[in-house]
Image: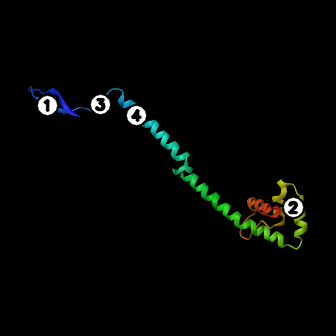
Amino acid sequence: MCGVLALNHVGRKESQCKFLQILQGQRPFDLIKGGIVGAILITAVGFNWAGYGFGWTLRSTAEQKAKDAGEAAIVRVLAPICADKFRQASDSVAKLAALKGTDSWKRDDFIKDTGYATFPGSEYDRKVAEACVELLTQVK
């Protein structure tokens, strides 16, 4: 959009491009406000709607998810071993009856006391004990 704007100092018509009208008057403030609102919306969508294909995440969140997934994998591997060790014990029938007779919130402590949820090279893990109890008390 170039046009004749004014006469120059010699009196000749001079063609000059108009300054973009979008940047004149109140328009720059409208653009800035729109840009800020757009940035906020894009950020909100990117971080909160990960299930819809956007999937932005902070490094700390990704690291925590990886740690949780690793711990869950360990529980999935060790809980069946714990349950198998429990079932193979010579007094497993009596211990299983005692386990089922124990209050639900004390069952992981029962497993801890038997030692089946503790493995060589590792410490007792309550999550492993809880999963072991779940496996042992499932109705077949």
- Residue 89 in the image: x percent, y percent? 85, 72
Name the residue that disc number 3 marks.
21
Q: Is residue 87 left or right of residue 55?
A: right
Name the residue that disc number 1 marks.
14
For the residue pair 119 and 17, the one nearer the viewer reads as 17
Q: Earlier in the sequence, mark 3 or mark 4?
A: 3
Spatial CA span between label 2 and label 4 = 66 Å
Q: Amino acid at mark 2?
A: Leu
Secondary element type, mark 1: strand
- Residue 76 in the image: x percent, y percent? 70, 64
Q: Residue at x 57, y 54 (%)?
A: 62
Is mark 2 in CB contact (under 8 Å) with mark 4? no
Marker disc for residue 23: none
Q: Amino acid at mark 4?
A: Ile
Spatial CA span between label 1 and label 3 = 19 Å
Name the residue that disc number 4 marks.
32
**124 is higher (above) or lower (below) than 26:** below
